[in-house]
Every structure is written in structure tokens, then in C-alpha cells.
């Protein structure tokens, strides 16, 4: 029990009182090996050897800094989302002239994904190998693995693509939702069989649905956002309802994170009643590091989910004031019980291989600050 908050309890299952969103800055050794692989100077096997070495170092560091579950830092990926989606059967990565969303002050590589056949998941998906590397490095220590939310495949391949024309098999959109759900259930069960008990779904669709400008733009194109958000919650619940009882599934909601830039803003009010009130995931990782995320009042719609407050920014190396963060946690308890709250950075430190604009030293200081505050608040 904390002296600051009465009746607090620790947590021994995900999400944890001190947690992270998942990605970490790519190390210099990994970046050099990736450049050598692209230049043809080393083989894929040689790169994989470097990758596993760097993941092992990262796992050891996460343990040293007090994290209760370790991730692979997304070290094998270029993107936080496109690599997984393009690895699904029936989905392909394609090049564009410009990235589909406009980041404020930065320009990512112009890639997206396209549905070209029946969507499915197979055991030769590259993330099976990626998770096995993490599991080998972690041993018996709990692992956490991040993949993009199923909503991301739908919004990227259909809604954001203004020229989208469904394949014949998906002219009835319910069949597309069915196949996406079934592919994710297969993926979840595969990772579970390999030892995963902590799966996080990353999602920027809800961040866009929080943006009044983006909502107006979508609605002007004739997109029914009420129906879309209901469909997305239904899709998420199909996956959650199929999970093994000892597996935690959380979702991180983001407004964009590339080289410390962002692409959408707006509080959670437009989606809170539908998402917080009806989605049966175990916890939400929510951005709350800037005014772009609005206030805590939408949290009144939370049911029995954990809420991981992203009060520590991953976009800069400036360290937050501990007392200010604790005061904001206190403010959030007006809407959610203290024992339904946790703390983390608002996003990963490297949602793409380029990483945010801060040093590795600053990154770990942020992780340490989250742990220090969590220890004070929840004991």
C-alpha cells in the first residue's frame, strides 16, 4: 500500500503498474548490420546472429531496469505495423509516392499494404521467427509481444485508400472482417503455443477517430464512422473472446509516432463510449503526454479494463517532473479507481527503425522514472 494513495495493490499480470509500450531505439550494432544486409555485405543468417545478440542485450537491460515482461524492442522490423500486416497471407507491401497520412515535421518512407487475396495467417509468418528469438533470449522470464491491431489492416487497406475496390470475395465486407478475425486468432494461438501470455495490439485508427478534422474528412467521403467503430470493437472482441484464459490482450492507442513527430490530435471523447464501454480487452495503453490527448473525463466510460496512463513522453529526452506526474495520476482517479491504473511512456521509443529523437541514455531514464513513480504510487 502506498502512502500517497490508500488501498493500492501491486499487479502480477499484464499490464503492469510500470510498463512500456514495447519498441526501443535500435542499437548502433543493429543499424550497422541492417545497412550491411541491404548492401549485400552480409547474409540473412549473419544478420540474424547480430539481431539475436542485440535482442539478448536488450532483454538483459529491461530486466535490470525493472520491467516485469521483456520485449524484443521490435528490432527485427522496419515499421511497427506494416511488416506484420504484409506477412499475412493475401496481403502485400506496396510503394507509394507519399505516405498515406501527413506527419507534422517528418516524412516516413512511402509504403502501405494492399489486400490481394484471401486474408489468413500461416506458421511461416516472419513474426513467428521474431517471437522465437525473443523467447530464446528471455528463457523463463515473461515476454510481451506487440503486433498491429486488426483494425489497422482494415483502415489502411480500405478506408485510407481512396481508390479501394474490394476483391470479389470481399464485396460483402462481413467476409473481410471474418477473415481478419480468423487470421488474428490463428496468430494469437500460435504465439500462445510458443509461450506468449502478453499480447499488445497497436492502433492508430482510434487516434484518427479522435480527431475532429479527420472525422470530418472521412464523413465527407461518405464513411459511416459510427458503423466503422462498432465494427472495429466487434472485431477486437471476437479475438479477445477466443483467447486462452491466462493470456492478457491489451491495446495501445496512438496519434502517430515517427522521428518524434505525430499526425493526429484530439481527446478520446468521440470514441470513449463505444471503445471503453464495449471493448473487452484487458487494458488500454493511452497517450496522455500532451494536450493533443485531451483530459481524463472520457475515462468515465471505462468498465473493468486496466488503463495504462502514458504520462511520460517518448518523443523527447526531457525528463518529466515526478510530482507533476503523480498529480496527474491523482487527477485520473476522479474517473478510474487507482487499482485500475498503471503507468508507461505514451508510445514506444522507435515505432519505426529510424527511432525517435532522443538518446539511449534518455530512453532508460524514462523507463526508470516510470518504475520509480509506480513504486511510490502503488507500493
Image (cartoon, rainbow, N blue to C red):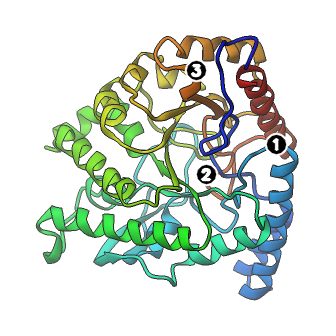
The nearer-to-camera label among 3 and 2 is 3
The nearer-to-camera label among 1 and 3 is 3
For numbered disc 2, what is the local secondary structure?
Answer: loop
* Relative vertical location of residue 376 with respect to residue 127 in this rendering, above or below: above
> Which is nearer the eye, 198 or 361?
198
Q: Are marks 3 and 2 in contact (CB under 8 Å)?
A: no
Q: Quadrant of residue 204?
A: top left
The disc placed on residue 310 is none
* Relative vertical location of residue 64 with respect to residue 263 in this rendering, above or below: below
Res. 15 in view: yes
- At x 23%, y 49%, the residue is 231
How many marks the image carries: the answer is 3
Marks 1/3: CA distance? 21 Å
Q: Where does residue 132 sit, x and y in percent of width and height?
A: 67, 75
Q: Are marks 1 and 2 in contact (CB under 8 Å)?
A: no
Who comes first in sequence, dot 1 or dot 2? Answer: 1
For numbered disc 1, what is the local secondary structure?
Answer: loop
Who comes first in sequence, dot 3 or dot 2? Answer: 3
Q: Quadrant of residue 46?
A: bottom right
Q: Quadrant of residue 281?
A: top left
Residue assigned mark 1: 66
The disc placed on residue 338 is 3
Horizontally, residue 242 falls left or right of residue 349, namely left
Residue assigned mark 2: 351
Res. 288 in view: no
For numbered disc 3, what is the local secondary structure?
Answer: helix
* Relative vertical location of residue 111 with respect to residue 314 in this rendering, above or below: below
Amino acid at each position: 500500500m502506498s502512502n500517497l494513495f490508500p488501498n493500492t495493490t501491486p499487479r502480477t499480470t499484464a499490464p503492469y503498474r510500470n510498463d512500456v509500450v514495447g519498441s526501443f531505439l535500435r542499437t548502433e550494432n543493429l543499424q550497422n548490420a541492417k545497412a550491411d544486409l541491404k548492401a549485400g555485405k552480409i547474409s540473412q543468417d549473419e544478420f540474424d546472429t547480430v539481431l539475436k545478440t542485440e535482442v539478448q542485450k536488450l532483454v538483459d537491460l529491461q530486466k535490470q531496469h525493472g520491467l516485469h515482461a521483456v520485449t524484443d524492442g521490435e528490432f527485427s522490423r522496419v515499421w511497427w505495423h506494416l511488416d506484420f500486416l504484409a506477412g499475412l497471407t493475401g496481403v502485400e507491401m506496396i510503394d507509394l509516392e507519399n505516405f498515406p497520412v501527413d506527419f507534422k515535421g517528418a516524412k516516413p518512407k512511402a509504403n502501405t499494404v494492399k489486400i490481394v487475396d484471401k486474408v489468413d495467417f500461416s506458421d511461416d509468418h516472419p513474426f513467428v521467427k521474431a517471437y522465437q528469438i525473443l523467447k530464446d533470449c528471455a528463457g523463463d522470464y515473461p515476454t510481451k509481444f506487440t503486433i498491429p491491431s486488426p483494425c489497422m489492416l482494415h483502415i489502411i487497406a480500405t478506408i485510407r485508400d481512396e481508390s479501394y475496390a474490394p476483391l470479389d470475395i470481399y464485396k460483402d465486407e462481413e467476409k473481410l472482417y471474418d477473415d481478419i478475425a480468423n487470421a488474428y486468432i490463428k496468430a494469437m494461438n500460435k504465439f500462445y503455443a510458443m509461450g506468449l501470455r502478453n499480447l499488445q495490439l497497436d492502433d492508430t485508427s482510434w487516434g484518427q477517430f479522435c480527431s475532429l478534422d479527420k472525422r470530418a474528412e472521412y464523413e465527407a467521403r461518405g464513411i459511416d464512422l459510427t458503423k466503422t467503430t462498432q465494427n472495429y470493437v466487434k472485431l477486437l472482441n471476437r479475438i479477445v473472446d477466443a483467447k486462452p484464459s491466462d493470456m492478457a490482450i491489451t491495446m495501445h492507442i496512438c496519434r502517430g509516432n515517427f522521428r518524434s513527430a505525430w499526425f493526429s490530435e484530439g481527446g478520446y471523447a468521440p470514441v470513449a463510449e463505444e471503445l471503453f464501454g464495449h471493448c473487452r480487452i484487458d487494458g488500454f495503453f493511452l497517450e496522455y503526454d500532451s494536450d493533443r490527448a485531451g483530459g481524463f473525463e472520457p475515462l468515465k466510460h471505462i468498465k473493468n479494463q486496466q488503463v495504462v496512463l502514458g504520462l511520460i513522453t517518448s518523443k523527447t529526452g526531457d525528463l518529466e517532473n515526478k510530482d507533476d506526474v503523480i498529480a496527474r495520476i491523482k487527477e485520473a482517479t476522479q474517473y478510474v479507481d487507482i487499482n485500475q491504473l498503471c503507468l508507461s511512456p505514451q508510445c514506444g521509443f522507435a515505432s519505426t527503425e529510424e527511432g525517435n529523437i532522443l538518446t539511449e541514455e534518455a530512453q532508460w531514464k524514462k523507463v526508470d522514472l516510470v518504475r520509480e513513480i509506480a513504486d511510490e504510487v502503488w507500493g
